[in-house]
Amino acid sequence: MPELPEVQTVVDDLKKAIVGATIVSFDSFWKKNVACGVQKFKKEVVGKKIEDIQRRAKFIIFKLEGDSVIILHLRMTGQLLLEKSISKSKKTTLLPKKKYIRHKWELKKNDEEYNLLFHDIRKFATVDWTDNIGNYKSFKKLGVEPFSDEFTVAKLAVILKSKRTIRSVLLDQQLIVGIGNIYVSEILFGAGIYPGRLADSLTKHEISELYEKIITILSRAITLRGTTFSDYRDSEGKIGGFQNFLKVYNKEGKQCEKRGCTEIIQKEALNQRSSFWCAECQKSIKNY
Ligand SMILES: [Zn+2]
């Protein structure tokens, strides 16, 4: 499932390519995931220019001229693929599996024409439109953005005043947005904290370490264009690069990579999701 670094990569790429483009047409082949209704969506977006592309949590927001927005969410397997068409008769074919294209936009920017294809195997990805983003229901309960000025060590300390496990607090999108199963394992390994520790048991020093790892690991993953295990692709259909630098996620049974550590990476179900950790490097549980 795409997390913050993957969504940010898609947003950054699309921003470079299609800000300033006009939406020429829209077609949906999976209409029930167009939340506002296909007819309304078409009426509101066709003919409009895309003025900006932004991310909020794991939502992708296209700001349109006239103060309305398209809101997309990749969910489990969504991919937003941008296909540049040289001419109407000679279109490049980016994807072999056309049957998984659920929605399609034709775009025009100066003399360039593009197809923006929303490819989604599992069919959970969503499309919506609103002219009242300030009141958009899905945004109301979202937590703090890790890269915002609001997210500080002090803010993290407040968030961690909880009797839940540190892992479940970091995954709670109403507290901090964008961290999922992959990055939570990597961040807790980096900070040397056992995933099952109670959030409010962290020391001041551990909270600072954790804060630093949240920022540095997410930043590095963005620089490396995200992590691909199965479905995630960037807007050119290419895989990410961070999977080559993972330390614990999906590494159960392998020796810990930290210098001098001879432990084997463990996999454990916590809150029904798999958690990966090193018993030596994240042994702080023994103190609690
Ligand atoms: Zn280790």
Image (spheres, helix red, strand yellow):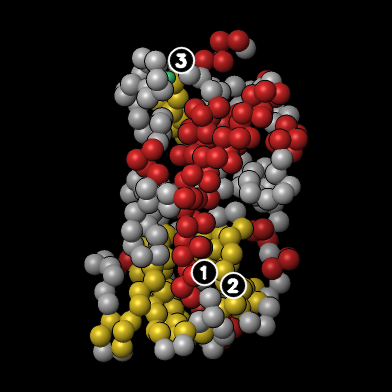
Q: Nearer the viewer, residue 39 or 129?
A: 129
The type of residue carrying mark 3 is Glu
Q: Nearer the viewer, residue 19 or 233?
A: 19
The type of residue carrying mark 1 is Lys
Q: Which residue is mark 1?
A: 15
> Can residue 85 be seen from the camera position used here?
yes
Q: Classify 10 Å Cα crowding around label 1: few (below 14), some (14-19), many (20 and above).
A: some
Q: Is residue 30 above or below residue 174?
A: below
The yes-or-no answer for disc 3 within 8 Å of ligand 1 is yes
The numbered mark at residue 52 is: 2
Label whose residue precedes the other's in the sequence (1 or 3):
1
Q: Quadrant of residue 35?
A: bottom right
Residue 46 % position (x, y): 53, 86
Residue 286 % position (x, y): 56, 10
Residue at 61%, 28% in the rendered image:
209
Left or right of residue 111, residue 59 in this image: right
The type of residue carrying mark 2 is Asp
Q: Classify 10 Å Cα crowding around label 2: few (below 14), some (14-19), many (20 and above).
A: some
Q: How many marks?
A: 3
The numbered mark at residue 280 is: 3
Q: Is residue 214 above or below residue 203?
A: below
Are dots 1 and 2 in contact, CB under 8 Å? yes
